[in-house]
Image (cartoon, rainbow, N blue to C red):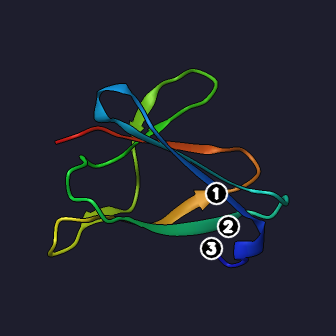
Amino acid sequence: CSDPSTLEAHCFSLPGGDLAMGVWKSNDADDSLALTVNDPFYQDPLMVDPLTMERLSTPGVMRDAEGRVRIQDLPIGKRPVILELGPQ
């Protein structure tokens, strides 16, 4: 993101091998995030709406030559963005 000092990011291992990440900004500025999941074991992430728990495809997802998940230009702000990745 443009100001890493305002970025909050937490990662959790869930039962069954799933991985969950929460990312948000500690200030009110809208921003975007680029991140890489180094373990190619995971499927492409889904965004989880924290109010409805609806799961949606995540924009900007691609895989590199090693199979790692890369996300570019993920919009983030004060409201948390929750990503969920299941095992392949």
74 displayed left or right of 6? left
Q: CA distance from mark 3 to mark 2?
A: 6 Å
Q: Are marks 3 and 2 in contact (CB under 8 Å)?
A: yes
- Residue at position x 17%, y 65% from top? 67
> Which residue corresponds to mark 2?
31
> Which residue corresponds to mark 3?
1
51 displayed left or right of 5? left
Residue placed furthest toward the right = 27
- Residue at position x 16%, y 42% from top? 88
Can you tell which quarter of the image residue 50 is in?
top right
In the picture, the quarter occupied by the N terminus is bottom right
Closer to the N terminus: mark 3 or mark 2? 3
In the image, what residue type sits under mark 3?
Cys
- Residue at position x 41%, y 31% from top? 14
Residue 25: mark = none
Q: Are marks 1 and 2 in contact (CB under 8 Å)?
A: yes
Closer to the N terminus: mark 1 or mark 3? 3
Q: Are marks 1 and 3 in contact (CB under 8 Å)?
A: yes
> Which residue corresponds to mark 1?
76
Which structural element holds mark 1?
strand
Q: Position of residue 10 (x, y in %)?
A: 59, 50
Disc number lying in front (3 or 2): 3
- Residue at position x 69%, y 74% from top? 4
